[in-house]
Amino acid sequence: MSRSARTGDDLDPRVERSRRVIRQAALDELAERGYGGFTIESVAARAGVGKSTVYRHWGNGLALITDALETLNEQPRPDAGDGAPRQRVERLLQHLTEALADPVLSATIPALVEAAEHEPAVRTFYRDYSARRRQSVVDAVTAGITAGDFAPGLDPDLASLALVGPIFYCRLITGQPFDPARISELVDHVLGPARTA
C-alpha cells in the first residue's frame, strides 16, 4: 500500500487527480525508459509536478511503480461469463489483442519483466497479475470441456498458454499485433474445430 492511501485525503478530488496524473506518467516513463532509466525526477517532469509532490504520495520509486501498475487492473475487461465457451475464449483473446495494441501497455510489459528481475514486489505483482488475467481463459476452456465443446483430455492450463502465447509473441517479439481475424483459427488449432450439434 502506498503512503498516500493512509493519509486520509483520498476524498479530495485534486489529490486524486494529481495521483492519477503521476501514476500515468510513471507508466509512460516505465514504458519509454524501462526500469533501469526510471526516476522520480523524470516522472515529476512528465506529470508537471514537483518531486516533493511525488514523494508526498509515494516514499520511493518502487512504491510508485507498484501503485501505478495496479491501475492496469482497472482496465476494462470483457465479461466472459455469457455465451458458449468457444465464444467466451474468442472474446477474451480479442480483448487481449486489443489491449496489446496499446503502445504504452505493450512497452510496459518488457519493463515489468526487467523490474521483476530486480524487485521481489514487482515480481509478485507481475506473477499475480498475469495469473489473474489468464485464469479467465482457463475457466472458459474448463467450461468448454465440461460442456463437451472441447476434447475431454485437454489440459485447460496448457491450452490457455497455447492460446495467449502467440498473441504476446507477435506483439512483443515481432513488434506487430496479432491479426484479430485469425483468432478463430487460433482457437480451432488449439482447442479443435467447433463441434456441430
Image: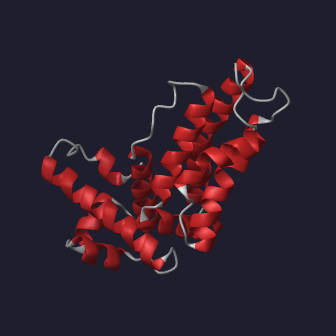
Question: Which residue is the extreme one toward the right?
Answer: 153
Q: What is the quadrant of the C terminus in the image? A: top right
Q: How is the image coloured?
A: secondary structure
Question: Which residue is the extreme one toward the front?
Answer: 196
Looking at the rendered structure, the number of numbered marks drawn on it comes to 0
Position of residue 148 measured from the top left corner of the image (x, y, whole percent): 74, 21
Please report the residue visible at 82 percent of the width from the left and 26 percent of the height from the top. Answer: 152
Nearer the observer, 3 or 146? 146
Nearer the observer, 110 or 114? 110
Q: Could you tell whether 42 is left or right of 113 in the image? A: left
The answer to whether residue 166 of the structure is visible from this angle is: yes
Q: Decide: is 10 above or below 124.
A: above
Please report the residue visible at 73 percent of the width from the left and 49 percent of the height from the top. Answer: 162
Please report the residue visible at 51 percent of the width from the left and 47 percent of the height from the top. Answer: 94
Q: Could you tell whether 115 is left or right of 74 in the image? A: right
Please report the residue visible at 61 percent of the width from the left and 73 percent of the height from the top. Answer: 174
Asked where in the image residue 63 lies, by quadrant, the reply is bottom left
Nearer the observer, 40 or 181? 181
Asked where in the image residue 11 lies, by quadrant, the reply is top left
Nearer the observer, 57 or 106? 106
Q: Decide: is 196 above or below 181.
A: above
Q: Decide: is 26 above or below 181.
A: below
Position of residue 145 measured from the top left corner of the image (x, y, whole percent): 74, 25
Q: Could you tell whether 62 is left or right of 93 in the image? A: left
The answer to whether residue 115 of the structure is visible from this angle is: no
Q: Could you tell whether 195 is left or right of 123 in the image? A: right
Position of residue 166 measured from the top left corner of the image (x, y, whole percent): 66, 57
Asked where in the image residue 69 lies, by quadrant, the reply is bottom left
